[in-house]
Image (spheres, rainbow, N blue to C red):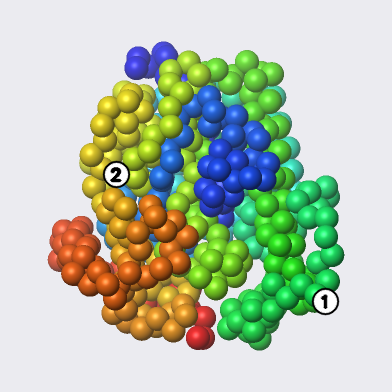
Amino acid sequence: MSDDRRPNILIFGLDTTPANHLGCYGYPRPTSPNIDRLARNGVQFADANLTGLPTTPGWTSMLTGVHPLNSGIVIHAEPPQQHALALDIEFLHETLARYGYRTAALEGRGRAFRSPYWMRNWETYLDRGGEATYGGGIPAEHMADILVEWIESGDADNGPFYLFTHWWDPHWPYFPPAPYDRMFYAGDEHNPGNTSLTKFHQHPWWKHRTSGGAGRRDPRQQAHIDLVRDVTDLEFVTALFDGEIAYMDAMIGRVLSSLEERGLAEDTLTVIVADHGESIVDHDMFFNHGDLYQTNVQIPLILHHSAGLPIRRVPDTVEHIDLVPTVLDYLGIETPPCADGMSLMPAIRGQTLEHPPVCMTNNNFGMNRGWRSGRWKLIEHMSAGHLGARPGDLELYDVVSDPYERTNLIATHQGLAEALRGEMQAFVARVLDGRPDPQLTYANHPSAARVPY
């Protein structure tokens, strides 16, 4: 692609948005009509997986194409100065700036992107004005206001531009504004005959949320705890989460409409991607994302550019560190040598994609690694953690026949599990190349604190 034909790039980075809660990924509720429209008319990856959990390693690896074990960013570090990223690891915006792109970012959560390495070399960091919410985040409505104002001001006309946006709303606590708070629920959330939340109220996760500082650090967290304390129906909480996604989607629709009205939509490559998903009740993890199960690691990945990309649904298993090499390949720009991901353009063009297995890391409420190879997924626990897991414990799932990972096959497939574990260990050794393992380095960091099971 020649320099004068390169499109604008707009990334909608969604926090806490599992693929299986979006209509285009088969969810029965209409949570995402605007995102679904992009998927219908663009390239949708049916099986995209993250490589690093939670948010900070997720976005860092995604927007550099570098695996967390290679970058060393594997946790939320506080203060940010504890995080360091080698200067030879280049972000997408740094690469694009060298090719004439104007770069701008608007992030809905302060802490995740306040590390010095993240702030470097942006041309414009858009004002985060508006009402602050949990964790320094701002509501989707204010995000849309800022972005529409930027588009309509004419700043977006002097392109090409690269704009990264991070949308915080689906993250717990769930407080969608009206009418989204009741969009998917018409029952009585306090019905004494409904006991679907009883298990949650007896769960160690609830005790952790209510007895420690997690609910007291932020008024909105505490308000959500107070709200759920007397609710009996789990479906009500799920509806709140879906309402958050629908609210965010509606505001994304405002931004897309502004691009269309300005005549910029056809010249813009639009990307929908998430840092991780969410467990509402899966594996008894309530309202959080502290595990490597599918509802947390399988994320939406959609690319739309009507002037250059086909309409295609790609079934291959891919990972989010593939995004940067794919975008740069599409633009005809060489991928920096630091990147570990691979270009997905062959799959987008309809060719066979031979993607290697995916190695996933998690240092959130326990430390574990995952290895996804075809239909099989292995999880190795490296510390005490969720549901009484002990260091060295293994879980094995056939995610094709058992997408919700309800049946751990470790007892009947020990040989397969050990073979997959050997593959994962070989991958880790190759990536680290003699360097210290960052997951082990940060194992006792407060940000990797574990739920007391």
Q: Secondary structure at mark 1?
A: loop
Residue 416 seen from this side: yes
Q: Is residue 55 above or below residue 65?
A: below
Residue identifier under label 2: 341
* Residue 90 place in picture, x, y as percent: 34, 44
Q: Residue 103 location in percent, x, y?
A: 49, 34
**Residue 125, located in which quarter of the rendered image?**
top right
Badge 1: few (under 14), some or many (20 or more) residues near its Cα, within 10 Å?
few
Q: Residue at x 59, y 56 (%)?
A: 110
Q: Which residue is mark 1?
A: 192
Mark 1 vs mark 2: which is more N-terminal? Answer: 1
Q: Is residue 157 left or right of residue 368?
A: right
**Residue name at image x 43 percent, y 27 percent:** 312
- Could you tell whether 6 is left or right of 25 in the image? left
Q: Residue 275 or 114: which is nearer the viewer?
A: 275
Residue sitting at x 32%, y 53%: 375
| Disc 2 element | loop
Tell whether 12 sits left or right of 258: left
Q: Which amino acid, mark 1?
A: Pro
Residue 397 % position (x, y): 35, 63
For badge 2, the amino acid type reads Gly
Image position of 196 (left or right of 271) = right
Q: Position of residue 157 (x, y in %)?
A: 59, 19
Q: Residue at x 66, y 35 (%)?
A: 33
Evaluate whether residue 440 shows in this view. Answer: no
Residue 131 is tagged as none
Foreground pick, 130 / 321: 321
User: Label 1 to label 2, Cα distance in Å?
Assistant: 51 Å
Residue 247 image-quadrant placement: top right
Name the image quarter holding residue 436: bottom left
